[in-house]
Image: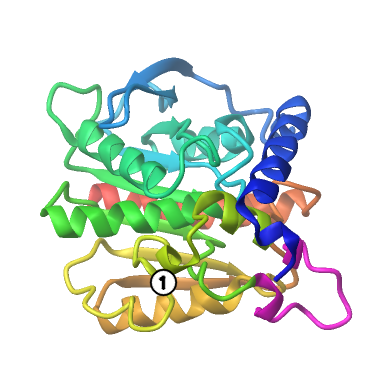
Amino acid sequence: MSILSKPFVADGVARLMAAGAARAMKPRPLFPEIPGRTAEITVPTRHGPMPATLYRPPEGGSARGVYVNAHGGGFVVGGPIGDDPLCRYLAEHAGVFVVNVDYALAPDRRFPVPCEQVHDALEWAASPGREWAGARLCVGGQSAGGSLAAAASRLALRAGGPGIALQVLHYPPLDLVTPAADKPAPPGRRAVIRPWMGEVFDTAYIPDAARRTDPLASPAWGGNGDGLAGIAPALVITCELDRLRAEAVTYAAKLAEAGALVEHYDIQGVDHGYDLMSGDPELVRRVYTFLALHVERAVTA
């Protein structure tokens, strides 16, 4: 542990990181052939109104499902715009509406606020009177967003709803108890997730280290992955070179024990955030196609 594990220090660094990320934030210029049929909306949550971007699928076809997406950024940086290529791709190729939520970031709003916001977005999306079929509901996210998708699915299990056809956990952090420095990095490479980043993110999000053992924060830690019978079917996507890979593999095994693992797909030769940074565009397209097929199957089953 370093000084970055001190909450007042982590909070200051997190705010500086968020300010820098906000100035530089823009999506990768992927899939220019797919138009963005979007509208800015507001989703009610127990913590107040939450902004979101709604992506519409192409016109025509039968009643469409809906996919609630949560972006990544270590719970402290980023925003929905970073996931614009993924959301456009899912709307176009899975034929779903996508609700890309702008959940509250730490340190201004800490755990479990974002988990509850994403769960509330699911309840809102599943309610009658929407443009889509609320019974055909999916939730997913990349990095921290994958953690929030897992937490929202667990909250849905506890609450008895809403019913979720698929949860997509895309290179998620699922163990905030174990320090990032103790997680294996690929030999001979500089990992994207570095120990100091883990300290800042985890401390800003959950300053009290004892609370990081909560199953909503660390579903892959200890026995937190037990008792998952009835949880939403899950697609788990990991990156071979990601420092966070092992915890997602552990959780995938727990989901499999509960009969809830649809598939675990390990992307070879890439690190965390491969699709958001400088990864091969054709690889990104292949993975997004794979993901969209799973979403389409889930909402049409």
Q: Is there any visible trace of residue 149 in the rendered image?
A: yes
**Residue appearing at x 69%, y 81% in the figure:** 184
Q: Nearer the viewer, residue 60 or 198?
A: 198
- The answer to whether 282 is drawn above or below residue 44 in the figure is below
Give the quarter of the figure containing the C terminus. Answer: bottom left
Q: Which residue is mark 1?
A: 263
Position in image of residue 233 (x %, y %): 28, 64
Quadrant of res 198: bottom right
Quadrant of res 271: bottom right
Position in image of residue 200 (x %, y %): 67, 54
**Residue appearing at x 27%, y 47% in the figure:** 299
Main SS, magenta residues:
loop
* Side of 240 relative to 105 (left or right): right
Q: Give, as a single range, the part of the protein colored magenta.
A: 180-196
- The answer to whether 15 is drawn above or below residue 196 in the figure is above
* Side of 36 relative to 254 (left or right): right
Residue 194 falls inside the magenta stretch: yes
Position in image of residue 83 (x %, y %): 58, 38
Q: Nearer the viewer, residue 179 or 121?
A: 179
Q: Nearer the viewer, residue 270 or 41?
A: 41
